[in-house]
Amino acid sequence: MATEEPTFVLGRGCVKPRNLSPVGAAIGSTGVPACYVFELPDGPGAIQYEIVMGYRFKVYDVVVVKRDNAGGAGDEVEVWNELTTVTGALSLNVADEAIVRPALLSASNVLLLGDTMRIITTAGGIGNVACSVVVLGFNVVG
């Protein structure tokens, strides 16, 4: 199965990342509140998507919706701030269209100007990691 590029859905109050690729990209937007919506494809092994933050951003919630069939054992997605996890591993071993959320966010939920937000999917085997990841937050002044 070929790996597709992620697509993005822009909703009210949401920021659409520009030029996002598995290797990295820049973003330059302002506004309070803000959210990022990532439509991530299925793919083998661990795949990492990155955005370099153009402003200080505090994550206050993450919602994951499983897409394109059920996941399998070991299928996971995580949101990271630089090299520190914000959500911990969220299992995608759920039915298609199921919603997954972290029980808590780490103290690393504030991304500074220039920090990299990473979304990492890990395929555990015969499952499927395709999902929508919604990162909700707001710009932080100061």
Image (cartoon, rainbow, N blue to C red):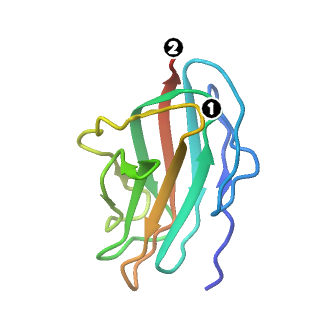
The answer to whether residue 65 is above or below residue 54 is: below
> Crowding at label 1, few (<14), some or many (≥20) Cα neighbours within 10 Å?
some
Judge depth for marks 1 and 2 and give the one in front. Answer: 2
Residue farthest along the left direction in this orientation: 103
Q: Earlier in the sequence, mark 1 or mark 2?
A: 1
State whether residue 68 appears in this view.
no
Which residue is located at x 67 percent, y 49 percent?
A: 8
Three-letter residue code for mark 2? Gly
Which residue is located at x 38 percent, y 35 percent?
A: 109
Q: Quadrant of the N terminus?
A: bottom right
What x and y, as percent, mark residue 121?
46, 65
The image's mark for residue 6 is none
- In the rendered image, which residue does mark 2 sit on? 142
Q: Secondary structure at mark 2?
A: loop
Residue farthest along the right direction in this orientation: 19
What x and y, as percent, mark residue 81?
44, 45
- How many labels, in total? 2
Give me the C-alpha separation between circle 1 and circle 2. Answer: 22 Å
In this picture, residue 66 sits left or right of residue 41: left
Three-letter residue code for mark 1? Cys
> Crowding at label 2, few (<14), some or many (≥20) Cα neighbours within 10 Å?
few
Which residue is located at x 40 percent, y 70 percent?
A: 70
In this picture, residue 125 sits left or right of residue 33: left
What x and y, as percent, mark residue 4?
67, 71
What x and y, as percent, mark residue 59?
43, 32
Which residue is located at x 34 percent, y 76 percent?
A: 72
Asked where in the image residue 58 lies, by quadrant, the reply is: top left
- In the rendered image, which residue does mark 1 sit on? 14
State whether residue 61 appears in this view.
yes
Asked where in the image residue 52 lies, by quadrant, the reply is: top right
